[in-house]
Image: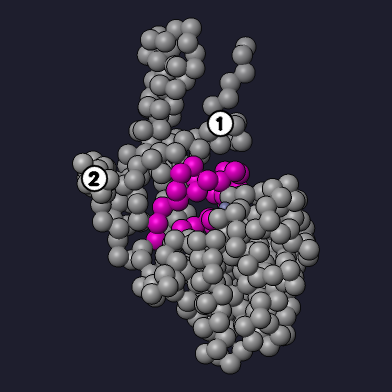
Amino acid sequence: MTAVSRATTGADALPDYAPVPPSAFGPPLNEQGYHVGRVERNLFWVTDGTYQSAFLLTGDGVVLFDAPPTIGHNLRRAVDEMAAAEGATNKVTHLVYSHHHADHAGAANLFGDDVIRIGHEDTRRLLLRDNDPTRPAPDVTFQENYTLQVAGERVELGFHGPNHSPDNIFIHFPDHDALMLVDIVNSGWVPIFNLNLSEDVPGYIDAPGIALGYPWQHYIGGHLGRLGTRADIELHQQYIDDIVESSKDALGKVDPTPYFVKYGPNAWAAVKGYLGAVTELATKPVVAKYTGVLGSADVEEFTYSTAFMIMQSMRLDLGAGSQVHP
Ligand SMILES: [Zn+2]
C-alpha cells in the first residue's frame, strides 16, 4: 500500500460534518493565497482564509496591525499591492500588537528593526518572558489607553482587562468606522476549544459587549475569511448566553448520586463522570440550534469544551453552587 492510498483511507475514516453556511466565508484568495481588501479609505485588511491582519497607509508610512506567520511574506505583498495602487509609501514604520500570541505576531520580525512597535505593557512583559526573536517586545507601551497618531491618522488603543489573553487590546479606528479585536468573535463561526482558548472566562464573556460600546460598522476579528458586522457580535453573544442558560439547566437536571455510589472512594472518577454528563446535556441543544447558522457548530467538542469552561467559571469565579460544610 502506498503512502497516498494510506492517507486516503485515513481521511475516509474521519467524521463528516454539516456543510459550513455560505455566510461564514469571505472573498476568494488570490494565487499567492491571500486576499487584501479596503475596510474604509486608507485602512485595509488581509486574510489567508484563517488569519487576519490590517494596515493603514499614511503619508509618513504604513502602520501594521498584527503579523500572523501564516500570512507571513504575503503581508509585504499585500502592503506593496495597495501602496502601489494608492500611490502611497510602502515603508512599514509602525507595528501594533493586538496581544502577545505567536499565531498573530510571529511574523513581526519580517519588518526590520526600524519599526516602532506598540502594545500593552503586559504584551511587553510576556514577550520579554517568551524571548522569541520573531516577536520583538514593543518599545511603546501603555496601561489603559493610547492614541496613535501618524500623519494625521488616529487610532485609539484601549485595554479593558484580561479576556482571551491577559494583554488583549481593543483597536478602534474612529475615522474608519472599524474595530479590531482579536480572538474574541470568529465572525460567522463558533469559538474553537475552551472558549476560543481563553484564559479569563468572565473577561471573554464581557468583551463583545465592550466592543459594541464603541461606534463602528466593520469588525476585524483576527480569524477566518471575512470581516464582521455588529450582527456577528450579537449572534456570538446569543450563542454564549445560550450555553450559560443551558449549563444552568443541565446542572439542575443531572443527579450526581449514582456517580458517587458507583465510584466510592475514587472521588475524581465520580467528578469526571458527573461533570461529563452535565456538560454533555448542556451542549446538545446549543449544537442543534446553531448547526447551519455558525460554521463548525456541529463540531461538538468546541461547544462541549466551551460549556465546560463556562460551567467551571460559574463555580470558581462566581461561586455558584458553593456550599459551606455545616
Ligand atoms: Zn491569541
Disc 1 and disc 2 in contact, CB within 8 angstroms: no
Is residue 211 visible in the rendered image? The answer is: no
Quarter of the image with the C terminus is: top right
Amino acid carrying label 2: it is Thr
Disc 2 secondary structure class: loop
Magenta-drawn segment: 181-209
How many numbered callouts? 2
Q: Which residue is drawn at 26% across and 56% down?
A: 19
Q: Position of residue 210 (x, y in %)?
A: 60, 59
Q: Is residue 104 above or below residue 76?
A: above
Instruction: Indicate yes or no whether the magenta region holds residue 205.
Output: yes
Q: Position of residue 24 (x, y in %)?
A: 36, 63
Residue ID for mark 2: 2
The mark nearer the N terminus, 1 or 2, is 2
Q: Classify mark 1: residues with Cα within 10 Å, few (<14), some (14-19) or many (20+).
A: few
Q: Position of residue 218 (x, y in %)?
A: 51, 73
Q: In this view, does 143 lie to the left or right of 296?
A: right
